[in-house]
Every structure is written in C-alpha cells, then in structure tokens.
Amino acid sequence: MSPQQVSWPVTRTTPQGQIRGRSRAIFLHHSVAQFARIDVYSDGVIKYGDGTNGYDFGSFVKAIHRGSIGTLLRRNAWLHFEERLSGLGTCTVDDFRPLTTADDLIDWTRTTIDELNPNAMELLDFGGAEYEDVDPRYPNLRRFRTVIATFAQYAKYDATDENIKGQPYRVAVHENGEWRVTDWMIYADGTSQLGPAGAIVSFRDIVAYASAGMVTSSAPEGQWINMEGLGLLKPKKAFWRISPDGLIAEAADILAKLQGKVGCLPYCLGTLRSYLENPSRESLDVLREAYGRIPTHMRETGLAIREHQIRILLGLPPAAHTDNYEADPLSGIRIS
C-alpha cells in the first residue's frame, strides 16, 4: 500500500524552510502501549513519541527490533487510544489480529523517504551510531543520537499547492456494521476527512455523522475495531473519557482555532480575568457562558486549578470528571 493511502501529509519548520513528510499510525510500546503516530520527512528525519527528538532511519529500525515501535498488541496489555492521557480513553487488549508487520512498517518508511526525496539529497544519517559519544564525566549515561524536530503541521494542498492547515482528532467510526478508530482531520477551510483514504467533505457533514452516531467517542466492548489498518482490536475493560456531545464541541473548537479564532479555553480564562478585574453581574454572566462552552472533558486539563476558582465564583459544586462513570485505573484519578 502506498504512503498516500495510509498516511497524512505533514510539514515541519526548519531554518531552511518547510520540510514535507508523511504521518501514519503506529503502536508505541513503553510502560503502556499507545496508539500513536510516526512522522517521516524528506530529509530522513523520523519523529515519534513525545518531545522533539528526531531520529535517523537506522535508529528507527533498531527501535522496531527492540520492540519500542511496532504493529502488534499483546493480549491483556493496556492500550491508550492516543498518546495523550486526555484522549479517547484506555482499554485492555482482549484479542488482536495483525493486518501488517513490523517489516511492512520499515518498508513503508523507506518507501516514503524515497518518494519524498528520490535523489537522496542530504539525508540525516548517523552512520549506524544510535547513541551519542559517552561523556567521560558521566560514563553510565547514554543518550540517543537525535536532532531537534518540531511537531508535525498537518496540511492538505490545493490546486495551487497552497498549504491549508489541518489538525487530527481521534474518533471511533461505525459504518456498514464495522468499527474503526481513525483520525478525523479538520482543515482550516472548513473541510474534513475521516482517515487518510477518506473523501474530503465539509466539516458540517462529519458533525452530522457524529450527531447520527456514526462518528463517536467510544466503541462497544467485544467488537472488533480496525486500528487504522494495523490490526483488529477486541477491547475489554474500556474507559472512554469523551461524551458524544463533547466530541462535537471539541472538534468545533479545533476548527475555530485553525481559522484564527480564540479557542474556548483561552476565552474562558480571559473572561475570568475580566471578572476579577471588574466584578459585576454582567461580567459574571459572561464567565458563566464562557465556562459552559468548554466540553467537560477539556476542563480539568485545560483550566487546571482555575476550574475550582471558576466554579466557586459561579456557585457550582466541585467538579467531577470527566464524562465517564468509572475510574481510570491507569491514572488513579476518578473521572466520573
């Protein structure tokens, strides 16, 4: 399968300008498995995981052989449906049927670099050295040999090759009796895609699918779920953090920010500052309206300690998070 069918176009910013790449789904295996993404660029830089570390192709292959990156999930292992704890949620792997292999992922990565840079010009290559030279002051400390790589900027290109910004939002899709977890790509021009091979439609169309239950924030246990072509997952003990209404509200907020508007979180914090500077019934009503705009699942992580302050001002009881009715065993935090 070609890179275009399973991946999104991305760019990253460097002193030399914009570097094009492709981004696709993988599994990261640390203390807990994560349904994550890998970004592969024309200059040979490969980025995965948190932070800004970029690796060369040789280091990436070694990470696959170590099992840090892969296409498989172990039975009874925990899985995060995203890299971020505040994403869709977590589950235990009841069963998993692979649809691709680690060698396929290596081949895809090599093919992607070759297609983006057919002349192999100025590729990052550490010559097989995965670690930096040992610092004699700290002989037991080994650091991976990396370069700084900024986070991926998702984009689509119009007929004039203009870059239109996008942002992925992970969702569950129920279509033709089958389930899959994929990215809802939201573009600044008001269009959207469900998965890299999906048709480009309007943002409103995907919202309509979500209102009808076809695009949602959870999937039932015991159902096989296609994990973006990596394999079929049957989850158990799943903990979903986002309500269907919360999913639509966050997606709308993403679109607003892509279009240069103020997101619901900074808007709410701005109204809080205004009220504290000039307390009045009117400014309190504005704060109440701003707080109500924020989806429940975004409040705890987005407002932090300010949420407690806002709820006291609004005369509300202490918050209970998020939209789920269970406790997430991975965090030890009650999220109901």
Image (tube, rainbow, N blue to C red):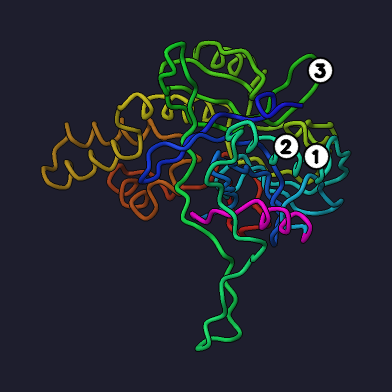
Seen as rendered, the residue at the extreme bottom is 137
Q: Is residue 300 left or right of residue 218?
A: left
Disc 2 and disc 1: Cα gap in Å? Answer: 6 Å
Label 1 SS:
helix
Q: Which residue is mark 1?
A: 104
Q: Residues within 10 Å of mark 1 (few under 14, many from 20)?
A: few
Q: Residues within 10 Å of mark 3 (few under 14, many from 20)?
A: few
Q: Which residue is mark 2?
A: 108
Disc 2 and disc 3: Cα gap in Å? Answer: 29 Å
Label 3 SS:
loop
Front in this rendered view, residue 52 or 268: 52
Seen as rendered, the residue at the extreme left is 278
- Quarter holding residue 219: top right
Residue 177: assigned label: 3
Verify whether residue 39 appears in magenta: no
**Residue at position x 82%, y 36% in the image:** 231
Disc 3 and disc 1: Cα gap in Å? Answer: 28 Å
Residue 115: assigned label: none
Q: Which residues are magenta?
A: 52-66
- Quarter holding residue 173: top right
